[in-house]
Image: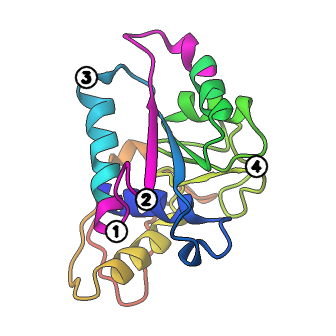
Amino acid sequence: MRRVIALIFAAAALIGHEGFAQQPAKVSRIGFLGPTSAPPPAVSQVEVFRTALADLGYADGRNVIIEARWPEGEQLDRLSELAASLVSLKVDVIVAAGATAASAAKGATTEIPIVFAGVVNPVATGLVANTAKPEGNVTGATTFDPLQAGAQIEMLKEAFPGLARAGRLGSRASIIPDSRGRSSFPRSPGSNHQG
């Protein structure tokens, strides 16, 4: 799943750059805004992202520059300042890990595309009006919207054509029932749900 999310980020980094492939001299700047200090979580997120970009032919420092920012310790109040620093660098896209970082990025710009991950409910947090058509400059992947599950499975099938079986881990407590109190997991055509 990390690889799929990283591939989504990589694709989003290229959105809006008409003729990107025709401009080899262009070095895109990607801002990465993490919610925690540099030790393990943020560093590993950036490394997964760098690896996924490298798999697609983008090398940090060669044809893409990743500007990573995160607050030291638990200084989440600095996220707005860090987001503003990414905007001042004129990055091409901001990748935000978590709702707090995504909200700080959204508060810093309405022009630069923002791609979030690790946001449970982007509608409730005010990042997007709805997940089907986010509008504005903010988009991303969420594990909250059960309707996205079918689309996520389709992305997996495209990324891994030989994929015969995929699993999904989650908590039944996070499933939202429909108007009749039933909960279901959307299925992709040809999928076999075991729950």
Q: Nearer the viewer, residue 101 or 108?
A: 108
Give the mark count: 4
Where residue 121 appears, x then y in whole percent? 57, 42
Q: Is residue 195 magenta?
A: no
Q: Is residue 68 magenta?
A: yes
Dot 4 or dot 3: first in sequence order is 3
Q: For the magenta stretch, what is the residue range?
A: 53-80
* Position of residue 97 in the picture relative to residue 157 (left or right): right
The residue located at (45%, 66%) in the rendering is 149
| Callout 2 amino acid | Asn
Dot 1 or dot 2: first in sequence order is 1
Residue 138, compared with residue 82, is above or below; it is below
Query: Real-space Cα distance between discs 4 and 1?
Result: 34 Å
Which numbered disc, 4 or 1, marks the residue closer to the eye?
Answer: 1
Quickly name the residue at label 4.
Answer: 129
| Callout 4 amino acid | Ala
The residue located at (43%, 79%) in the rendering is 154
- The crowding category of the residue bearing disc 4, from other C-alpha atoms within 10 Å (few below 14, some 14 to 19, many at least 20), is some
Colouring mode (rainbow / by chain / secondary structure / one colour): rainbow
Quickly name the residue at label 2.
Answer: 63
Report helix, strand or loop for mark 4.
Answer: loop
Give the number of the disc on residue 39: 3
Report helix, strand or loop for mark 1.
Answer: loop
Which residue of the protein is positioned furthest toward the front in this rendering?
25
